[in-house]
Amino acid sequence: MKSTFVRSCLAALLLAGTAFNAHAQEEVIVGAATSLSGWMGPFDKDPTRTAELAIADINAAGGLLGKRLKLVHIDTKTDQALTSKAAQDLVKQGAKLLLIACDFDSGAPAALVGQKANVISISSCGADFKYGNLTIGNNVFTAATDAAATGRILADWGTRKKGWKKAYILLDTFIEYDKSLCRGFKEQWQALHGKDGVVLEDTFKNADVSVASQISRYNASGKKADVIMLCSVPPGLASTLRQYRAAGIDLPVLAGTGGAGNALHSAVPGLTNYFFLNNSADGGVTDPNPANEEFFKRFEKRFGERPAVGQGITGYTVVQAWARAVEKAGSFDTNKVRAELEKFKDEPLIGGLTSFTPKLHTNVDRPMLIISVDGNKREALGYYDIRKGDFVTWW
């Protein structure tokens, strides 16, 4: 009788152990509703690939709360209808996290699906403020730095480090990111130089074949600027740059994260006197942060090239931030994970110092890397922190 009881207990323990191991190895899905084609392709491709690397790193270290992560990607092809459907499919598969587009207009349909299903959605590098101000809901975050904040950083850096005083603002009305970028720049520039610090403002559309009228208006104004703030994204940004340079307007040009990337620089031969900012170095540029350089080597080994744009690293940041919050919460429960994300204060992630609050799910004070271009040769000048008015390191 005793031996039968012992055998029964041992059998029960073995069965429980088998069930535990199976549970421990259960996969947790990270869904990616991002574009590999269309105009969003160049912005979404590398973040999607770096998210893959983040998941591989977590799994190699034993998984997350004892579970393996699995990336399931659906190409949304820069199509809003496909984006919504992709998010719905990923939620049905049980995704605990949605990686969404590097642009609010493109990613909002996926964020809406995630919000309704109570799944956390994090954009890789979508910088429009509506990603971070709970416009869609409290489950939506972005690993980017707010577009208006990057505009303020550029204005502050241009003033304190270059001594520029008069700015000409040229806005591409294509997407909300461009508008937010210029708005932030103007606010900071006029705070530093007064209303007269902006000598002229003009607009164009990304699809415009010619910006001859804008060039004529600047020349006819008789006003001399020290710098042009160009708020745009490719392909319109490259076309506009070429036309201004061809017209003999060689003023320094400032651009946001939309003005980064190998494709842009190759589209403007001999590009000089051009400055932009990013989360990390573009392909071919040495990053001041040694950890980023080490990451780029791993990325190149896996994919045969470095990330084409500095925002590429933000896909890794999305998974890293969510995983860190899961660990702190000790749970995959959305409400508990969200609460931990909202406690981040200058959290040192691969995409930079990251902060969130219950009311702000984007970054407004993160140091950003300033990169100069001279004869198409790019050089990282350093990570500029507007809070200090200087370059900083945190590694």
Image: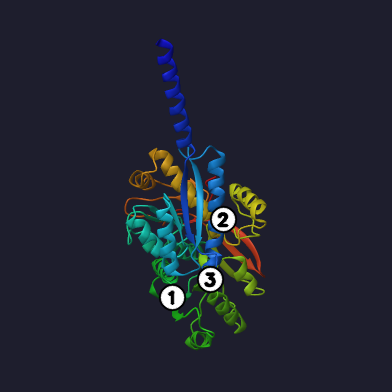
Q: Residue at x 58, y 62 (%)?
A: 309
Residue sitting nearer the eye, 196 or 205 = 205
**In this image, 358 relative to 20: left or right?**
left
Determine whether the residue tagged by mark 1 lies in a helix, strand or loop: strand
| Residue at image mark 1 | 198
Report the amino acid beneath label 2: Arg
Query: Which image quarter is the C terminus in?
Result: top right
Q: CA distance from mark 1 to mark 2?
A: 40 Å
Label 3: how many Cα within 10 Å (few below 14, some 14–19, many 20+):
few
**In this image, 16 relative to 46: left or right?**
left
Say above or below: 223 vs 260: below
Report the amino acid beneath label 1: Val
Going by the picture, which residue comes out furthest to the top?
2
Q: Give the mark, 1 or 2, whose residue is nearer the N terminus.
A: 2
Task: Give how far across and how far down residue 169 sits, in percent.
Answer: 46, 75
| Residue at image mark 3 | 38
Say above or below: 166 vs 365: below
